[in-house]
Amino acid sequence: MRVGHGYDLHRLEPLAPHGTGKPFVLGGVHFDHPSGPVAHSDGDALLHAITDALLGALGMPDIGRLFPDSDAAHRDADSTIFLREAIRRMRAAGFSIGNLDCTVICEAPKIGPRRDAIVSNLANLLGCPESLINVKGKTHEKVDAVGEGRAIEVHTVVLLRRSTSSSD
Ligand code: MG
């Protein structure tokens, strides 16, 4: 078995034309919200943190090294591209998802009402049952940048199980 941890934070700003925030997307699910992440890609902090957890469990280079934000090819990129590459590497290394636990911290929007949609989308992407995926939403109690609605933060932990024989 392997364990991986992922973390991501994105600054939140008003959407254009009032700011440079991009439409709010989390776990591949879009939210109707007046602010969104400042990012080179689409800024999906949950998909970024899951991607890093998978890559970390595999002992591979992190998302910033695999997909540098200096690469124009990733501008406004759908972050499922990053996660799909991490999943491809996981399977190639002979592993499958044991379980995935995610904590999303932001003051708004509320994650709860879209939680089931996020879990369903993640299960589809990861090719595993929804029962192996947990997503929790929390606030930062109005303190610091996250609590003031100026950022979103995500922590993830993933357990991988060896699914095929391998010499690794
Ligand atoms: Mg990110």
Image (spheres, helix red, strand yellow):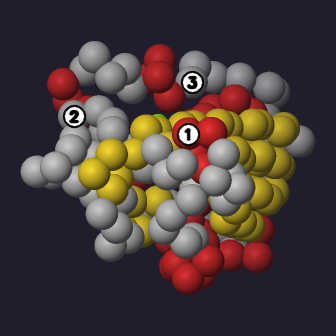
Asked whether the beta carbons under mark 2 and mark 3 sit within 8 Å of each other, the answer is no
In the image, is 1 to the left or to the right of 34? Answer: right
Gap in angstroms between the C-alphas marked 3 and 1: 25 Å
* Residue drawn at point x = 28 percent, y = 16 percent: 70
Q: Is residue 92 visible?
A: no
- In the depicted structure, whether residue 89 falls above or below residue 143: above
Identify which amino acid the numbered label 2 is placed on.
Answer: Arg
Identify which amino acid the numbered label 1 is placed on.
Answer: Ala
Residue matched to label 1 = 145
Identify which amino acid the numbered label 3 is placed on.
Answer: Asp
Q: Is residue 17 visible?
A: yes
SS under mark 2: loop
Residue matched to label 3 = 62
Residue matched to label 2 = 75
Image quarter of residue 9: top right
Residue 128: x and y, percent?
A: 66, 68
Asked whether the beta carbons under mark 3 and mark 1 sit within 8 Å of each other, the answer is no
